Amino acid sequence: MIPYGRQDISEEDIQAVIQVLQSEYLTQGPTVPAFEKVVANYCGVQYGVAANSATSALHIACLALGVCKGDLVWTSPISFVASSNCALYCGARVDFVDIDPLTYNMSVKSLTTKLELAKVAGNLPKVVIPVHLSGQSCDMKAIAQLGKKYGFKIIEDASHAIGGRYLDKPIGNCQYSDITIFSFHPVKIITTGEGGMAMTNDLFLANKMMRFRSHGITRVPEEMTCQPHGQWYYQQLDLGFNYRMTDIQAALGLCQMKRIDDFVRKRHEIAKKYDELLADCWLTLPFQHPDSYSAYHLYIIRLKTNETKFTHREIFDRLRNNGILVNLHYIPIYAHPYYEVLGYNRSDFPESESYYSEAISIPMYATLTESEQQFVVDSIKKPLGYQNLF
Ligand SMILES: *Cc1c(COP(=O)(O)O)cnc(C)c1O
């Protein structure tokens, strides 16, 4: 079996986790803040707030920006449901912006048109969540300009994108957003088992997120409504959650950060090889925007359906039957039953629809071997049993 993505755990990673297990603190010890600091420094951003998943981090990011009932949040339909669910958790309504046909990221053209219409109709979004699909940054400069013009806040869902760069700066530096979210799920660039982190340059937002991840509780006297009653004292200021990352997870993340640039470099080598081996095939290969250095979480191929007699489904099944666990990132969020009843119109998202009918994510991870890669390519080009057809 060849999965589409998987972790790379070294002996040093294992030792780092064991060290925490033998230490005083399994959670709320020194390792989570150390991990936050290392990720923040790597990205060139002021603050990192670790959480037990990117989903939790997205939720507390929305809460910190004041998303609540009656608000509107916009995101990309070609994403994992968490990019959108985070707004629903806050009682907000969600709408989607169609994707760009080249990058498959939120289209700035569609966003602009939708904003113009929303302004007239009086239903502008409070927050927009662009998603850096496969690790390639959205056109953040343009989105930030629109944010200023129309008064919305920005959360970058960079779950795929730690280690990637945009305009020669690390993704996560929040130059064009209020908050950026990373995921450390095992299929992502680095892992903590489960985990995520919210990056920001805004101390107020960082403090809010830290409270929301831990029941809404503060132990900082300056944040309290009165003088502390004593050393035991803390106050609950908001309705928060238990979204904390453990020191065990942070130790793994901290150790993985040492190899992040190697991981991404390796992913680029694999991508380059796929680019070469699949160049003559009836496929659209990943477009790389010159402003971006992708973290290459995913390698997404698209079928040129007019150039092959095989259907999308047939190619997908053939790869799966060969033990290659390809995937489709993603089913448009509005097409899930839970969302369907909220009343979206598929015809509003023609690029997402066409993407969904053609895209396949083929295996991409740092430890993918050359022979495995060759097998993937052969399986695409020369299907097993193909000869029997003639
Ligand atoms: C993986 C992912 C998430 C959720 O990450 P978790 O850490 O599993 O909660 C959110 N958004 C996108 C785009 C993702 O790929």
Image (tube, grey):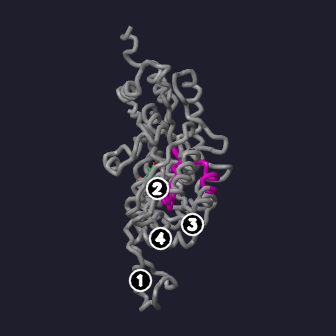
Question: Which residue is outermost to the top?
Answer: 390
Secondary structure, mark 2, is helix
Comparing 1 with 291, the one in front is 291
The alpha-carbon separation of the residues under discs 4 and 1 comes to 14 Å
Secondary structure, mark 3, is strand
Q: Position of residue 270 (x, y in %)?
A: 56, 34
332 to 254, vertically: above or below: above
330 to 252, vertically: above or below: above
Comparing 205 with 105, the one in front is 105
Mark 4 or mark 3, which has the lower sequence index?
3
Q: For marks 2 and 4, give the one nearer the viewer.
A: 4
Mark 1 or mark 3, which has the lower sequence index?
3
Q: Circle 3 sits on which residue?
A: 47
Give neighbour class at mark 1: few <14, some 14-19, many 20+ (Cα, 10 Å): some
Q: Which residues are magenta?
A: 121-145
The answer to whether the residues at label 4 and label 3 have Cβ atoms under 8 Å apart is no
Q: Amino acid at mark 4?
A: Met
Q: For marks 3 and 2, give the one nearer the viewer.
A: 3
Q: Circle 1 sits on which residue?
A: 234
The alpha-carbon separation of the residues under discs 1 and 3 comes to 23 Å
Q: Which mark is residue 15?
A: 2
Q: Amino acid at mark 2?
A: Gln
Mark 3 or mark 2, which has the lower sequence index?
2
Mark 1 or mark 2, which has the lower sequence index?
2
Q: Amino acid at mark 1?
A: Tyr
Comparing 102 with 241, the one in front is 102
The alpha-carbon separation of the residues under discs 3 and 2 comes to 27 Å
Give neighbour class at mark 2: few <14, some 14-19, many 20+ (Cα, 10 Å): some
Comparing 385 with 112, the one in front is 112
Q: Position of residue 238 (x, y in %)?
A: 41, 75
Do we see residue 263 in this rendering?
no
Q: Amino acid at mark 3?
A: Tyr
